Amino acid sequence: MRVVKKINENWLFTKKEIDIHNISLNDFEKVTLPHTWNNLDGQSGEDYLRQKCYYAYQFIKPQSEELWIEFRAVSQIAEVYCNGILVKYHEGGFSTFRANLTEALKEGENLLVVSADNSKNDFTYPQMADFTFFGGIYRDVYFIECAKQHFDLDFYGTSGLRLTPLLEGDRATISVEVLTVNYEGDLKYELLDQDAKVIDSLNTNDKNVEFKLENPHLWNGLADPYQYELRVSMPNDSVSQHFGIRNFKVDANKGFYLNGKEYCLRGVSRHQCWQDKGWAITEKEMRTDMELIKDVGANTIRLAHYQHAQEFYDLCDKEGMVVWAEIPFISMYMDNEKADTHLKEQMKELVYQNYHHPSICFWGIANEITIGEASAHLGNELQVLNDLVKEIDKTRLTTIAQVSPLDMDSDYNRITDIVAYNHYFGWYGGQLEDNGNWLDEFHQKYPNIPLGLSEYGAEGNVNFHTEEPQNHDYTEEYHCVYHEGLLATFESRPYLWATYLWNMFEFASAMRDEGDVKGKNNKGLVNFDRTIKKDAYYLYKAYWSKEHFLYLCGKRYAKRLENTNIKVYGNGFDTVSLYLNGELVAEERGKHVFNFNINLHEGINVIEAKANGFSDKMEIERVNEPEDSYRYKGSANMRSWFESGALVINEGYYSINDTLGDLMQSAEAKLAFGKFMQEMSQGSENEMAAAMGDEAILKMMSTSKVCDLINLAGKRFPEDAILAINEILNKIPKA
């Protein structure tokens, strides 16, 4: 029989270049998988190591007829050697792949060597994106001992079993396809319910069979994520797979339907990295992520921007989350045949390996790929990917995450079944109300195209606070104001087939130095190590969760002036009472959000919110001067420069207070800014500046002010250089 054994312990690792045929294990150090060499430098905001590194594993040859090794992911290019013989080459850092070691084995001790290479190249995706590309064997590894007659282990990392449940009325048809190796005899099929009870069985040598179920128990999202199981056996081998029976559709006017009923999809996006761990996380971290997503009340997850671990897709099945799964075709199209072939292989692996998951309803073919100039080749590649998905899977919908500046009239919005946009109005340029205006304009213009919001968000640093929140002050208070605006926008627009917050968790992005934080995207509702739920977390819980609760915002805003604003989030109440040092000071009516303005007493003040037996309490101290540590110094310096006259704004002339789009309208201003960015990007340590100097990135950020983008790059831009480019722009007249 098949024996599957996890082999995460007793691996060796080295960053040194080695000779595969003459290896000294003295050059290696002992590690445990999952492992990455970028867990610290990948979140530092400085250069991180991108190269080929090596892993080694010693083992005794087992007695089985065949021995395979399964890697759940190696980033980004892997070479697998057994006793010096290359047994597998694999491109793509996010999918399962296997290698047959049998022919390379010898009696006694054997040596496995695996190279993992996350170096830059021009053919594997991703190569440009706002997240760190961690290297390593960062998911679990298994030995599979089996007989020569077995279920196929070499078909795109699948189990060799493919299930297609189709629901028509009160009857479900489960089509089963089986791939075997060296075996043509009878197979035993068993259909089991969720309690592991056999409800139907079949013995036949047919590898394509069907089961019929009358009145099946449906997989019904959060309310009832019911799953069946199918087991298939042959002599000496067996496989099994869980699956769910459901149907769904998307209506351009009413959104998503699950099993014939409206099912409003409101959810979050997730990256797989954790603080100090990078991508090398275990099921423990995955379960923590799922518990937090469940607690906030989301019912859908966009698993961005690559194939996630099977364990997490399994969690989505079990918890009833509707999933958008996608490949890392992101930000930059590499126009060459090798890269196109690689894309198709990543798409095949994603769809084939995850075909059985009832949680997955949408296959994403690309994210912000039109940042660069559109081309016939790019359009053709998107169409090829979409057609490939539809050929493999006729039961799900295809989608795409479009970059904000892409014209709503674009033909790129007619390739996939449904579309979505990444919009950050109110953070990267524009105003909060622009979100609703844009969505309404698109829906009015193209009422038959299902529209969703694939990303939206704002940075929120839990150390920064203010009474007067404004865009790009990085405060926790503006983080709340932004999300209050977006949630109100969604509530009045049922035609949106789904919305996905960017992001549920803070994550590593080595290129960033923003809001006094290096190497990290701070848009998450939860911080990087999952220990702090930001105030906005409770706003989403108030809107989405069925749990009744009260939450006082601003607990980290502990030092305030006499007059202060108090905000309460809650669910299940229409009136909230506020108490100051035990005395009732105000009552406010509302829904989810309750705002108060009070005067504090001298010293420590106890604030308490109450409603229908629920309460929350905090202490804040009245101070005479604003707490300096609560203010983001970067944006403050920029404002003070403007106020003092150091940064001149001459009417009728350009300045860094203009948007990139404004600058791009003038050949002279565009040239001046281009030279400035070229100078700022000298040296590999300034990857952010280099990216911002890219024509494609400039197009994406066209609605953002130059001063805001300089803030985004943090201290990578010297003050004298900022003053100098502003002075140059001040001499260029606007048309």
Image (cartoon, rainbow, N blue to C red):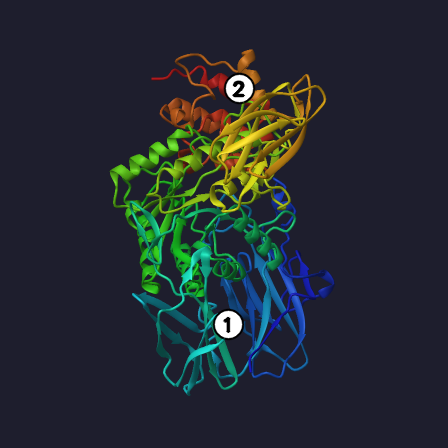
Residue at screen point 61% across, 54% down: 285
Q: Quadrant of the C terminus?
A: top left
- Comes first in the chain, label 1 or label 2: 1
Marks 1,2: beta carbons within 8 A: no
Q: Position of residue 100 (x, y in %)?
A: 53, 75
The disc at residue 692 is none
Q: Which mark is residue 724?
A: 2
Q: Nearer the viewer, residue 698 or 498?
A: 498
Which three-letter amino acid code belongs to the residue tagged 1? Asp
SS state under label 1 = loop
Q: Position of residue 182 (x, y in %)?
A: 45, 84
Q: Is residue 677 above or below residue 78?
A: above
Nearer the observer, 536 or 662: 536
Judged left or right of residue 123, residue 637 is right
The circle on residue 195 is: 1
How far, Cα to Cα, is label 1 from label 2?
71 Å
Of the two numbered discs 1 and 2 in the rendering, the one whose residue sits closer to the viewer: 1
Q: Residues within 10 Å of mark 1 (few under 14, many from 20)?
A: few
671 horizontally vs 470: left or right: left
Residue 347, percent from left and from top: 41, 59
Looking at the image, residue 67 sits to the left or right of residue 377; the answer is right
| Residue at image coords 53%, 83% | 147
Which of the image's four quarters has the N terminus? bottom right
Between 147 and 208, the residue placed more toward the observer is: 208
Left/right placement of residue 467 relative to residue 164 reads: right
- Give the residue displayed 42% in from the left and 55% down from the top: 339
Name which residue type carries label 2: Ala
Quarter-of-image position of residue 455:
top left
Residue 112, horizontal then vertical, whole percent: 63, 70
Image-quadrant location for residue 111: bottom right
Q: From this viewpoint, is residue 722 visible?
A: yes
Is disc 2 surrounded by few (<14), some (14 to 19) or many (20+) residues within 10 Å?
some
